[in-house]
Image: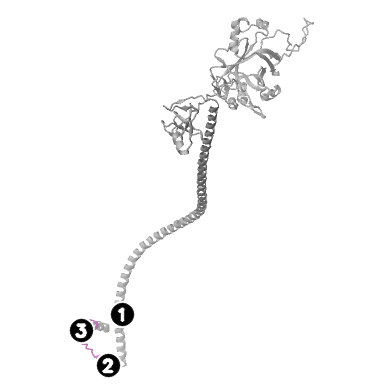
């Protein structure tokens, strides 16, 4: 719901000539006599072309409020009315009997219904009024259907007034609620809703009403403007709700209604809605607007020889002999290089003069000229036919060439499309293989990294073990040399011992053991190298 709303005033202008006595008894808004010429002129100015019509007001009151709350909009009638209650006759007047005279829930008068809209829109946070008016309710909606439509809000509606005037196929409904909040809820729920599902175009148009008045003049209240009616749909036009369009004749319509109007004229006065555009002839080549010539054969428009010369260029290109000047209707013959008409040229100065044809001779000349012109036109048309046949054959050749090239291009496109499909499939397969190879490559890179780390570790360990091996090898060689030396000494000692034991056994078994036992062994001095060995042996023997 918008933050701003316009309040409306419903005013019923009663025809003063219908019941002058009633107006004088209850007091009219205007203090002047109804037949005053000035008052009549003011009423005519306010009414415009509208005429008074019969207005019927039907009242429907909520039973919870009681029958005594029924009150009409119009002033109290002077005729006998039906009492609102059904109480017994008073004891003081036993001869008084209640009676019915007409329908007390229906008011009928003659006049014009005015709907005034406040010029200033009011900002509100709550409901500005407890009264709403439903505009342009379709006549197909009966009172029973209307009560069904507002049935969910029956407990909140205090009074319903159906107002029918001279407008065809529609009426308006005034709703009075118990509180402003109920009116706001009804406005938010039903405004813009369809009355029934069978007619989705019949929408509920609700407006806020600040007051309902009656009077004998149509003067709008201060600060209010009367809402006009659309001539097409006969509904009130509110620019805050619907788009309003004013055309050249100052008639105002709903934009949607004027769109449905198929004609280009005003629906009211038949005036053209938009200004007509003037057709300006221009040269087809240079778009010039001066000295234009139109070809009588094909309708080509070209400029004169003193401007761009496009008309003469068209003759040289197509051999179209005749061209007419726009504005003067003079026909020029390019083949004879002169004008073609029934004027004669003066032989002295070549000026065009008019001659009177002398009776039958003139008619024969006219017939001969017509025949000659017919022959000339026939020849020109034959030339034109040949020209266009050549053009058609050329166009057919061009079309065949274009068709052949198009077919070859289509075949190439189809082959390329098949190649694209094949390449797309190969691309998909290669992408799959590439993904697999990338996965394998990642695994191999990972393994290579592990192998390199392991090789690096092994190289580090190899160098340390190589150093240890070198040290151990040196130790082993030194140990081996020492052991070989000790083994050589042990072998020498063993040989000496064996020699000693052998000598003892030989001596013990010898016959000369006594002599040998008391003898001495003299060993000559050996060489220096052998002296040490002998001394060692000697020592061993001594041991």
Residues drawn in magenta: 515-534
Residue 293 placed where, x, y %? 47, 31
Residue 251 to residue 479: above or below? above
Res. 527 mark: 3
Residue pointed to by mark 1: 490
Residue 35 located left or right of residue 317: right
Q: Quadrant of the N terminus?
A: top right
Of badges 2 and 1, nearer the viewer stands: 1
Does the segment drawn in magenta span residue 521? yes
Residue 290 placed where, x, y %? 44, 28
Of badges 3 and 1, nearer the viewer stands: 3
Give the camera-side residue of 207 and 369.
369
Q: Earlier in the sequence, mark 3 or mark 2?
A: 2
Question: Alpha-carbon distance for marks 2 and 1?
Answer: 32 Å
Res. 514 mark: 2
Residue 99 located left or right of residue 54: right
Quadrant position of residue 172: top right
Helix, strand or loop under label 2: helix
| Crowding near the residue tagged with mark 2, few <14, some 14–19, many ≥20 C-alpha atoms within 10 Å | few
Residue 32 located left or right of residue 319: right
């Amino acid at each position: 719901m918008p933050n701003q709303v316009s309040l409306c005033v419903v005013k019923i202008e009663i025809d003063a000539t219908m019941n002058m006595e009633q107006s004088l008894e209850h007091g009219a808004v205007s203090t002047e006599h109804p037949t005053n010429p000035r008052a009549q002129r003011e009423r005519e100015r306010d009414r415009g072309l509208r005429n008074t019509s019969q207005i019927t007001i039907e009242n429907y009151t909520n039973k919870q409020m009681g029958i005594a709350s029924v009150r009409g909009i119009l002033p109290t009638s002077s005729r006998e009315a039906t009492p609102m209650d059904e109480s017994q006759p008073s004891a003081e007047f036993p001869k008084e009997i209640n009676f019915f005279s007409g329908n007390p829930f229906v008011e009928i008068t003659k006049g014009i219904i005015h709907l005034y809209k406040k010029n200033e829109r009011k900002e509100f946070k709550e409901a500005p009024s407890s009264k709403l008016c439903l505009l342009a309710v379709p006549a197909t909606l009966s009172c029973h259907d209307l009560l069904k439509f507002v049935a969910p809000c029956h407990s909140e509606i205090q009074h319903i007034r159906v107002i029918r005037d001279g407008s065809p196929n529609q009426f308006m409904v005034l709703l009075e609620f118990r509180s402003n909040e109920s009116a706001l809820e009804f406005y938010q729920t039903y405004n813009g809703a369809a009355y029934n599902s069978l007619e989705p175009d019949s929408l509920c148009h609700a407006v806020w009403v600040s007051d309902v008045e009656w009077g004998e003049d149509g003067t709008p209240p201060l600060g209010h403007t009367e809402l006009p009616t659309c001539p097409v749909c006969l509904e009130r036009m509110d620019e805050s709700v619907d788009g309003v369009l004013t055309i050249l004749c100052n008639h105002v319509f709903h934009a949607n209604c004027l769109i449905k109007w198929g004609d280009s004229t005003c629906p009211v006065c038949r005036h053209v809605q938009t200004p007509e555009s003037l057709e300006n002839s221009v040269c087809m080549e240079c778009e010039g607007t001066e000295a234009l010539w139109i070809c009588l054969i094909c309708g080509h428009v070209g400029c004169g020889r003193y401007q761009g010369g496009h008309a003469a260029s068209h003759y040289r290109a197509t051999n179209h002999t005749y061209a007419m000047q726009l504005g003067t209707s003079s026909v020029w013959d390019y083949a004879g290089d002169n004008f073609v008409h029934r004027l004669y040229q003066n032989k002295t100065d070549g000026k065009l003069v008019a001659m009177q044809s002398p009776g039958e001779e003139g008619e024969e000349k006219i017939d001969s000229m017509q025949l000659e012109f017919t022959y000339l036109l026939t020849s020109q048309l034959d030339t034109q036919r040949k020209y266009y046949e050549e053009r058609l054959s050329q166009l057919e050749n061009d079309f065949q060439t274009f068709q052949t090239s198009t077919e070859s291009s289509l075949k190439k496109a189809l082959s390329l499309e098949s190649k694209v499909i094949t390449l797309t499939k190969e691309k998909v397969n290669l992408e799959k293989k590439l993904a697999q190879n990338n996965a394998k490559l990642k695994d191999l890179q990972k393994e290579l990294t592990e192998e390199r780390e392991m090789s690096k570790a092994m190289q580090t360990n190899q160098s340390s073990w190589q150093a240890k091996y070198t040290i151990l090898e040196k130790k082993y060689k030194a140990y081996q040399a020492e052991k070989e030396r000790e083994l050589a000494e042990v072998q020498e000692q063993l040989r000496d011992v064996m020699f000693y034991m052998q000598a003892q056994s030989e001596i013990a078994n010898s016959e000369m053991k006594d002599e040998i036992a008391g003898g001495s062994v003299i060993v000559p001095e050996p060489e220096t190298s052998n002296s040490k060995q002998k001394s060692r042996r000697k020592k061993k023997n001594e041991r």
